[in-house]
Amino acid sequence: MSQEKAKLTIGGETYEFDILTGSVGPAVIDIRSLYAKTGMFTYDPGFTSTAACDSTITYIDGDKGELLYRGYSIDQLAQDSHYLEVCFLLLYGHLPSKKELTDFTNRITNHTMLHEQMHYLYRGFRRDAHPMAIVCGVVGAMAAFYHDSTDITDPEQREVASVRMIAKIPTIAANAYKYSIGQPFVYPRNDLSYAGNFLHMCFSVPTENYEVNPIIERAMDRIFTLHADHEQNASTSTVRLSGSSDANPFACIAAGVACLWGPAHGGANEAALNMLREIGTPDRIPEFVARAKDKNDPFRLMGFGHRVYKSYDPRAQVMQDTAKEVLDLLGVENNPTLQVARALEKVALEDEYFVSRKLYPNVDFYSGIILDAIGFPTSMFTAIFSLARTVGWISQWKEMIADPQKKIGRPRQLYQGEVRRDYVLLENR
């Protein structure tokens, strides 16, 4: 804590507030006593200038284009680590030893199956239901099947719930995909990696063998790693707010899934791919670039720029390299959407309009391209995002539950409605 004080003068009265400093990043003004001292609240729609918690998990520097998980840069983790090791890091705060990683991997691998009765939940949905509607419902329903891990006051139950969620979310998402295309559910296999198992559950069928391609498997693992956590974004804040009421962990994660479903949040890669399909062919790119530059045209290029990152999204470079590996493997000659993506990327990286405004291709631009090339429909993109982000939500939830300063979330408001009025009887109106 800094010895420096922030001073606020209102109507001739001056009030002092502590300034708190973290290990890195902007300092914050501690305004917890603001209402008690002044009778006033702050007004901050979207909480863009408000720190609602302290955390040791993830750090973002938007100006530098930096993303750290527990102090480790995302590019190093994506290059040299893998998703389950990153899960361990986020959950427990340190890189695991070989023994720790083996034990953790075994615990995840041995909990991938769903309670058999949960399959009946899927059959209650229409076949054309969006996978996110199914994932949200099934995740929330886990509290009805796993009663022995809903007591948030018990550290052991919190641990069991965490492992169950990370282990079962690929099966939940894969089942949602299989159900939507009318194919039978595929049970998880313990001999495959986390990413490989997900691909197998999505694309294998009982009538023939499915071999997981290592390049596709690695691409899937990187997508999971790059989306594992992203500080106090909308869905993570939703999980924390839900958890602040002492709701069970499955309900909290379901709330995160619901928030992520919004097109302004988790649906960005789906929107980016839809835009590429709207453009249609590379020769139409100049037309759409011109529209993006026209202030009077509501059209905007999706998958470019980022609310937090004011320079290149650090995840995008890894995704760009991964996209090249996948497209070189699968080819783009017969896929006009991917041809448009490559041509548009080149324009955005060279055009002064985009470069000067730092509208670089972001992680959503590349991840959508990769998932489309692998064979996933756009409706599955956000479900895969929620799969990857589950470990981040759980890590943030566990941190919040163990925080001695935890309070139920209760934002205030600037009321603009009617003042007190007398009720008028119906016959007198």
Image: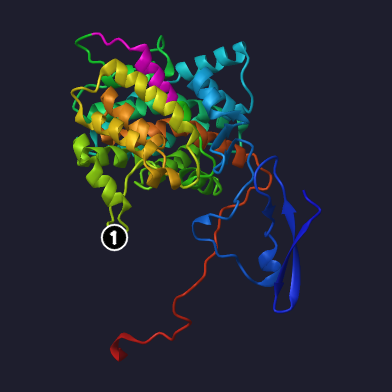
Identify the image's colour scheme: rainbow, by chain, secondary structure or one colour.
rainbow
Q: Is residue 49 magenta?
A: no
Residue 362 found in image quarter: top left
Residue position for label 1: 296
Task: Give the extent of the magenta segment.
Answer: 209-223
* Residue drawn 25% across the image and 8% down it: 209
Q: Position of residue 158 (x, y in %)?
A: 56, 32
Main secondary structure type of the part rendered in magenta: helix
* Residue drawn 37% across the image and 15% down it: 215
Left or right relative to 16: residue 57: left
Q: Position of residue 114 (x, y in %)?
A: 37, 24
Foreground of the two, 139 or 411: 411
Q: Amino acid at mark 1?
A: Asn
Left or right relative to 346: residue 126: left
Foreground of the two, 181 or 4: 4
The vertical placement of 143 against 335, above or below, is below
Q: Position of residue 89 (x, y in %)?
A: 58, 25
Q: Is residue 211 magenta?
A: yes
Q: Please say whether residue 128 is visible from this viewpoint.
A: no
* Residue drawn 36% across the image and 31% down it: 367
